[in-house]
Amino acid sequence: MKRKLWGPIALLMLLGIATSGKVDPFVANEDPLISSDRVEQKHWVDSVFSAMNFDQRLGQLFMVAAYSNKDQKHVDEISNLVKTENLGGLIFFQGGPNRQARLTNYYQAQSKTPLFIAMDAEWGIGMRLDSVPNFPKAMTLGAIQNQKLIYDMGAEIARQFKELGMHINFAPVVDVNSNPNNPVIGYRAFGENKETVTRRAVAYMKGLQDNGVIANAKHFPGHGDTDTDSHYSLPVIKHAEKRIWDVDLYPYQELFREDLMSVMVAHLNVPSLDQGSNIPSSLSRPIVTDLLQNRMNFQGLIFTDALNMKGVANFSKPGEVDLKALLAGNDVLLYSQDVPKAKALIKDAVARGLIKESEINRRVMKILKAKYWAGLDKYKPIDTYKIAERLNTPKTAEVIEKLYAESITVASNKGDLLPFQNLDLRKFASLTIGDDGKVFNQYLKNYTQVDHFTVQKAAGESAHYNLIKQLEDYDVIVVGLMGVTNSPQRAFGIAPGDIQLIRTLEKRQKVVTVLFGNAYGAKALEGMGNVVLAYENSSETQKLVPQVLFGGRSSQGILPVTVSGQYSHGVGGYLSDANRLSYGTPESVGLKSEVLDKIDEVAQRMIQIQAAPGANVLVLKDGKVVFERSYGFLDYKKTVPVSKETVYDLASVTKVLATTQAAMFLKSRGELDMNKTLGDYLPELKNTNKGNLVLKNVMIHESGLKAFIPYYAKTVQSGQWRGDYYKASLETGFSRPVSNDMYGKDALRDSIWNWTVQSELLPKPYKYVYSDLTMYFMQAVVERIVNQPLDEFLDQNFYAPLGLKTLTFNPYLKMPLEKIAPTENDVAFRKRQVQGFVHDPGAAMYGGVAGHAGLFGTANDLAVMMQLMLNKGTYGGITLFDPETVDAFTKRQSNISRRGWGWDKPEPEAGKGGSASKFAPKSTFGHTGFTGTCVWADPENQLVYVFLSNRVYPDAENNKLLNEGIRTKIHDIIYESMTSEKK
């Protein structure tokens, strides 16, 4: 809450305070520690204060370091100080959330006066505790233009603090980092520009304080232009007072106007502010009292920086340094190393008249006011039940994702190479230096085939030469520069030889270099054509950068510091996306993770009852994949676990993601008329019973075609292959693979086509009969129009341009079998376990490429094809259908069934879903597959659901998946996860 005093009274107050003119003469900062219920606050403060003797009051001035990863001796030491010295509080450092929560309860129970619990958690409590994720560091935040996101970060950190019973976060850092060689601030600062720093600091501070946690601005009066680390020695700030006011103190002035509650005073020597020789600012009365309190009128809590740091400890012994800090004007003595000695010295100082007892009492009252504001008047022990889960909520992940996503900075983009286009015309490789880049490569491969290479830092000329040879056939190389440090003295850990390697590659190929680390390290990348700054090397940045490179997300980050002539403050800005898939959290699109987690139970039940040995489930909303999980194994022997890269036989999903979409492509270009007949496109059918079948009726399964023909039965005799149809090895005239070590005669495809053409029609009037034969005919129509086999046409026009590396027919020719889920142990026909070959016998006999079956793929590649449909025919800058065609094919086209042209749909009756969820809108479209697959797209909610399994392993008669409604149950859960506004 803002509390400001305007007008003449304020002016008179300021004239009495200072003559520097540095404080806004029309604004006086009121006491930020005053609570909205100030009467109750005063009553509590007075009662607690009165209950303490002078020694106990002195204890309130001290906060000591506590750890939750140390032994019992440490616990006993802290416990003793709490009980005997009546400490004001504890600052927790390394440990774990459960242990810290239990220790906090233990220490609070022993304290006469409720303890302040604090943490130096600039990028969240993960900075100190295990089992908790980190938020971005300050320089990363400096690249973000949307300050609301930084407020949200402060709010979420505040929530975590309160879960752990903590009250003060020693953040934000408000140093203006004007020195690139600063060894201690650097990446901990928001940037080099005072406005950049101030706006972000205010957002972070408000996020904390609006949610009940005291913020602390540091390191006063400004640690941004030093070349010395105050942890080890005393830095000297040589700037004139005017410059310090104009730059370093600017953020503090603005924060004071916004009711900042506390400040930390650094250990710096600032001659222009204090003429004393080698006096640390934390011990300087001219700085702490005259400047901060009087001239700047700050009335909040004043903390020293840690009193064990060499920047101050080198000049005074423990206890003595505490007294000097108190005499300088500090309220709270942080990380005191000898509280009993310090208290004795303070008492002696009072006796000698160096400081009045009333002044100490005033500071104690300030501390108690802050404790009331923080809720310690109503102290409750921490509920330790599932504390780690409460700290790591879906909301936490959502906030972290958004922050990192908006920080990614495209610092140079020569020739508008980014985002990548023409995926089918370029061969991609990734090279990570200093890290295996596993997550980075995984997400790169979501967009196209990217071959991955890795090399250690400073690997040497021989290793680099070999890499250059290995990479020479690639068109584009994405280099992930990892293993970057924060040490300017060591060139941020970037080896000159590694930079030379990148420059050598850049002379031969298109190279994009991604710096996963301190932005100051980009100085080594001066002159490179394509540079992206990720600021940190984390799983989040490794996930997000590929999305920017391929246009799944836009880039909006701006470089917050000047690194070199090319990479100066403000470089970057908006780079549009390419309308490709992105990847993120369910909460970022309005879904609830805790509801989606119920999918796990259904999947585990599926495996338990052996409805299928494993599965992949993907949920895509608003163009973002927010749920993709793998369950079980490829078989019941548990030989290979299912992964996101597992390729499944899609069965009848082929009908829509191959043949139907090919028909849509032609319809959009005026080359296919759904009102024409099969005979119009296949003249050889004109004198048959198929010649007059109208395409639109064929595509809704209402043209009299039989459901299927058991083609294989015509080619076996007494349960064995007929020798005139199959051979166990490749022979002249038998070159058509049907399975491993099984070859059909060359004319087998012609035989199937003839049997299909010669088949009888069902009696008129034609009713709805779901038929595989429809797609044999539609495949023939498409192939006749394009004069090209269906698989080649689809790969050339769809799959390769879209970057879909696994969506293919006959995958045994293109990938290792262990990547492909096995299907049936076919005892009736092929007499072998089917893997890598299409399960459907007719499709296998047809050469593995049939209009109704034969397509294989991963969940991610299927998601792209379904998003193409939701995008009304465009994806990644490619237009394959016009919107009118998408609407026509996906709407209900039948009066007697639920079908669209090729596409399946929910039942038309209210409350019925058919093969889809009962919650799915009637505009939903998709398809299921016999092998245990399905895809569904909901245009109203921009929702895609993909389910892939091999339920036919090892027996196609296993119908538990269908009988148990596994696929529709999961679809129902997805709708349940939507917020009420979106249902």
Image (cartoon, helix red, strand yellow):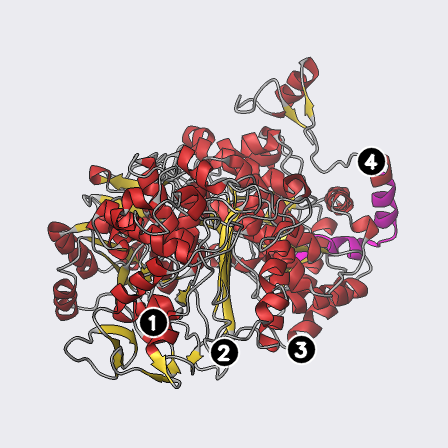
Alpha-carbon span between mark 3 and mark 4: 41 Å
Q: Name the residue under label 3.
A: 72
Whichever of labels 1 and 3 marks the residue nearer the N terminus, that label is: 3
Specify start and end residues of the magenta stretch as a single range: 42-63
| Viewport quadrant of the C terminus | top right
Whichever of labels 2 and 3 marks the residue nearer the N terminus, that label is: 3
Please tell me how crowded label 4 is: few (under 14), some (14-19), or many (20+) other residues with Cα within 10 Å. Answer: few
Disc 2 and disc 1 in contact, CB within 8 angstroms? no
Q: Mark 4 points at which residue?
A: 37
Q: Main secondary structure of the magenta part?
A: helix
Tell me if 930 is positioned left or right of 864 in this view: right
Q: Name the residue under label 1.
A: 837
Alpha-carbon span between mark 2 and mark 3: 60 Å
Q: What element carries label 4?
A: loop
Q: Any magenta on residue 59? A: yes
Image depth: mark 2 or mark 4 in front = 2
